[in-house]
Amino acid sequence: MAATPERRRFPRAARGLFLHYLRLGSDPPTWNIARVKDISVVGVSFTGDDSLEVHGQLELKLSLPTMELSSFRGTVLWRREVGPGLFEYGVVFRPLEPGAAAALRQFVDGLLRRHRQ
């Protein structure tokens, strides 16, 4: 069966990635870890056991091969419960610094090339 071509404006990719996230303004600040479902140059979806609010602001940290630890800010666009106490989230990145944006684009492009092969 042939793969369906990606029709999104910003194609998404993932390969067993994890990220750390922090709710901005949380007291005390607590970092959580989540499994990435997919990532693009404009956002990320992930699953976690923390109940985040739609429109909530996050700081995200992701290890990219081209950068030791990249830090991004984002806004939760949507959430849905996928199991008891387990949620899936869609987060859009806030405008990225040029270096972080280039590293993310290079990383996502590399994942997409490997996926097509």
Image (cartoon, rainbow, N blue to C red):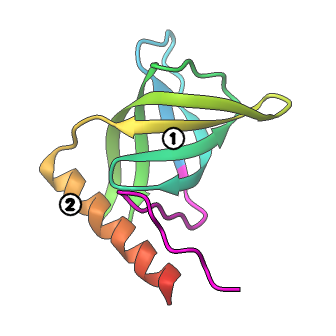
Residue 93 in percent (x, y) is at 34, 39
- Distance in Å between CA atoms under marks 2 and 1: 20 Å
- Crowding at label 2, few (<14), some or many (≥20) Cα neighbours within 10 Å? some
The answer to whether any part of residue 65 appears in the image is: no
Residue 27 in percent (x, y) is at 50, 9
Give the overall secondary structure of the magenta segment: loop
Q: Is residue 6 magenta?
A: yes
Q: Secondary structure at mark 1?
A: strand
The image quadrant of residue 104 is bottom left
The image quadrant of residue 80 is top right
Residue stretch rendered in magenta on the structure: 1-18
Give me the disc on residue 20.
1
Q: Mark 2 = which residue?
A: 102
Give me the disc on residue 70.
none
Q: Residue furthest left?
A: 98
Q: Amino acid at mark 2?
A: Ala
The disc, 2 or 1, on the residue closer to the chain's N-terminal end is 1
Q: Amino acid at mark 1?
A: His
Whether 66 is drawn above or below 76: the answer is: below
